[in-house]
Amino acid sequence: MKHYKITTALALLALLSGCQTLPQSTDNVENEPITENTTTAPAVPVAEEQTTEVVAISDVWQRLRQQLQMPIPDKKLIERYRQWYIANPKHLQQISERAAPFLYLIVDDIEKRGLPMELALLPIVESAFDPFAYSPGAASGLWQFTSPMARHFGLKINWWYDGRRDVPAATDAALDMLEYLYNKTGENWLYAIAAYNTGEGRVLNAVKRNEKASKPTDFWSLSLPRETERYVPQLLALADVIKHAEQYGIQLTPIDNEPAIQVVDIGSQLDLAKAAALADIDITELQRLNPGYNHWATAPKGPHKLVMPSDKADAFTEALAALPKDERLNWIRYQIQRGDSLGVIAKKNRTTVDIIRSVNAIKGNTIVAGKYLLIPVSLQDAADYPLSAEQRVIARQNRNASRYSSKYEVKAGDSLWKIAHQFKVSSSELANWNGMSVKDTLRPGKVLVVWHQTENRKGIVRTVKYKVRNGDSLARIASHFKVTVGQLVKWNQLSHEKYLQPGQMLTLFVDVTRSDS
């Protein structure tokens, strides 16, 4: 397999030659993979007696930029993206700050594999270096894996853990995938990068169509999906802007050229609040470094790994070793109530049926009222784990302050389209409000938020909690708050056939300039 080889001499040569002028080429540029002999830098003669002081690289961006070697052809789309990045310097500055914990790891892995350094910029194109990014196409994480592709390349996905957001694990999987695509597409990196976006089948079929029609088969001559035809130019434009950042007036926040994080093997499940306390860091910082964990603890069946700041890893490891095994998680004794099921108990305690079965040696679903179950539960309140999947969805659901919302509990047979149609909104809006993709499967019991336009934009709409009193009816309550019975029913998922019960709580969205309250 052909790879880029970054030699010490080449790195030194780049340091001596400084920033090059913007590389240009014609539309007929060949798309063969760049080999170790490909370079645009002129040879620098050095006298035998001359002693050259090697300047240590202190910034990962400097290290990365010296290894960007792909030719930048003169194409309109490349120029369009180049100008966008130049006109929006804050975008790359923010990305640089976001990339700080992970860029060293990515650059280091790419160097060890001998791959083109341009691949280190793919997370900018894919996710703007946001490990929590989730696309409408149901792709997730820094490298935007879909679930099937993630599993194919060895990433686990379950209730507790999503390997697509685990940056070290997902980086390995993404580079494995890119190497596979490079081999599959005839060792052509532009083909491989395009295939990362759209699949090798589409790229290879496009090549075959051009061959059959006696047309050129370089990437720029292929007929590919619109998104893919822009994906490769965007990456090349980005590489050019990063390489010549100073020339273009781009300020990239420096990132120390040393490991910022360390992966620690913790051996078994651990509450993230406990882990943060042992490491003497804020739980939000810990979750930012470990976005793969969906809930309040690491996964029971692994991976048993935590990403820690490098300067905290040793102290954390020592503190963890001194922690008794039974203090890694918080446990409760739960007495089974009449009407309980394993599913109800699991939901109530924010865990899974499998965990309850495993801990209590239960086979099947039979439980007996009055008996006790041992259940691992979070050490702190749910809100104290601000970047858990649950809290991220709540934050997204509550972010639209200019509108009012209602809640909808998913029922058997529901679909996103069906619910969206019921509330007269689009499926994509409904998915976005709830941190989902339109392709995601809905499970009965899941609560969705639906945002509504205020009916009187000149009014002041407030959320009101109303406790039903003796003698109340839907008509009386609606009249009092100047809303309709239909609105009350929709906001609270009520049935016209069922009576209101004293003490029942209703949610209303009231224009306080019109109500009698």
Image (spheres, helix red, strand yellow):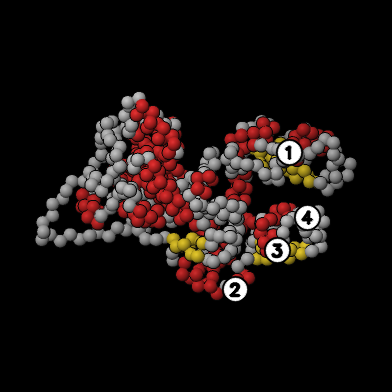
Q: Earlier in the sequence, mark 2 or mark 1?
A: 2
Q: In which image quadrant can residue 464 be found?
A: top right
Q: Can you see residue 490?
A: yes
Q: Which residue is mark 4?
A: 340
Q: Earlier in the sequence, mark 1 or mark 3?
A: 3
Which marked residue is nearer to the observer: mark 1 or mark 3?
A: 3
Q: Amino acid at mark 3?
A: Ala
Which marked residue is nearer to the observer: mark 2 or mark 3?
A: 3
Give the distance between the C-alpha atoms of the residues marked 4 and 2, in whole angstroms: 32 Å
Q: Nearer the viewer, residue 459 or 243?
A: 243
Q: Which residue is mark 1?
A: 491
Q: Amino acid at mark 4?
A: Asp
Q: Amino acid at mark 1?
A: Trp
Q: Which residue is mark 3?
A: 361
Q: Is residue 13 left or right of residue 190?
A: left
Q: Nearer the viewer, residue 65 or 451?
A: 65
Q: Which residue is mark 2?
A: 324
Which marked residue is nearer to the observer: mark 2 or mark 1?
A: 2
Q: Earlier in the sequence, mark 2 or mark 3?
A: 2
Q: Are marks 2 and 3 in contact (CB under 8 Å)?
A: no
Give the distance between the C-alpha atoms of the residues marked 2 and 3, in whole angstroms: 23 Å
Q: Nearer the viewer, residue 486 or 311?
A: 311
Q: Secondary structure at mark 3?
A: loop
Q: Earlier in the sequence, mark 1 or mark 4?
A: 4
Q: Earlier in the sequence, mark 3 or mark 4?
A: 4
Q: Amino acid at mark 2?
A: Pro
Q: Are marks 1 and 4 in contact (CB under 8 Å)?
A: no
